[in-house]
Amino acid sequence: MTPPVPDPATRTRRAVLVAAALASLGRSTRPRAAAAQDASGLLRAGAEALAALASFHFSLTTPQGRTSVLNALTLRAIEGDVLRPDRFEARIEATAAAIMDLTVTVIGVGDRLWVSDPRSGGNDWIETSSGEEADSPGAGDILALLANPDLIFLAALSVLTDPVLGPDGSIDGEPVRRIDGVVDLRRIADAAGAATDGALPANLVPDPLPASIWFDAMNRPRRIELEGPIFPGEDAGVIRRLDLTAFDAPVTIEPPVAGTPVSGA
């Protein structure tokens, strides 16, 4: 039996419905594609702005969960400065064995690393080794990862995947744009760029981490948050927050001199 042929009015209504559906599909697809393109463009611009910086101040905090390293230290805060291409100085506040608060200063110049000796009241320095075997990292490697944000946090800009635009906001009254994505620490070791120098220790937790990055009006990263453990034994929901300020401000970082008190000690 031959199916009935729709009358002209019915054919017209169907054509209108199909056209409307296609138009709706196009409208819903184009914004998503444009948003992904905008996020990728902002991420590239941010990486370029970061690479162009000569210096910056940073503050690393843990707004959620606990950051634990070396099986005994719980970090409270890290604050310091980076001077490109290869110098940094940071003040680390931590709690040892859950009972004793301590503060140490870490200075890195090239491939050398010094840590203030907390037993000396801030008057002595210990040069510790770094760059040990990747599968057996020493204290120097761990301290460098924590005290130099170039090694993990800022290197994340070059390996962040699935970037999408998040809600705009403000930091310290300054308008910022946000990108959300995923960071795989294993890719950082292979990423080419000024922020990566050598392999990351193999005992870092390999799970991909949700990440958010906020950029200022000049596309410079103002804040980076990584959610999830970096070192074994950390809280599953730990969030680390890195804030950057004082871009290209004058900074002097020199190797410490034996017997010279730690600044601020």
Image (cartoon, helix red, strand yellow):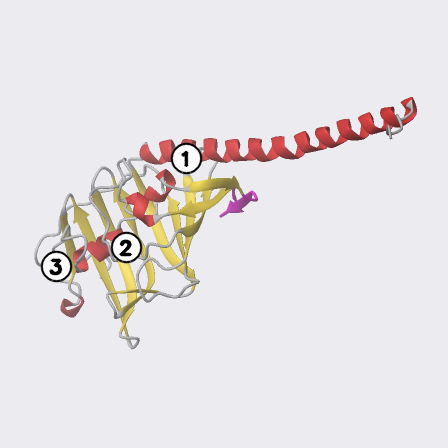
Which residue is the site of mark 1? 46
Quarter that holds the N terminus: top right
Front in this rendered view, residue 68 or 135: 135
Disc nearer the start of the sequence (2/1): 1
- Mark 1 → mark 3, Cα distance in angstroms: 36 Å
Residue at 23% across, 47% down = 88
- Is 171 inside the magenta-drawn segment? yes
Counting from the top left corner in percent of width and height, residue 20 is at 77, 29
Q: Nearer the viewer, residue 56 or 85?
A: 85
Q: Which mark is residue 146?
A: 2
Amino acid type, mark 1: Gly
Label 3–label 2 contact, CB within 8 A: no
Element type where label 3 sits in the image: strand
Structural distance between the alpha carbons of marks 3 and 2: 18 Å
The residue sitting at the front extreme is 1
**Residue 57 visible somewhere in the drawing:** yes
Place residue 83 in its image quadrant: top left
The correct choice, above or below, for 195 with respect to 72 in the image is above
| Marks 1 and 3, the one that precedes in the sequence | 1
Q: Which residues are magenta?
A: 166-176
What is the x, y in percent for residue 124? Answer: 11, 61
Residue located at (15% from left, 50% from top): 131
Q: Earlier in the sequence, mark 3 or mark 2?
A: 3
Most extreme residue toward the top is 8
Calculate the distance from the C-alpha at mark 2 to the C-alpha at mark 1: 22 Å
Q: SS at mark 1?
A: helix
Q: Name the disc covering residue 125, or none.
A: 3
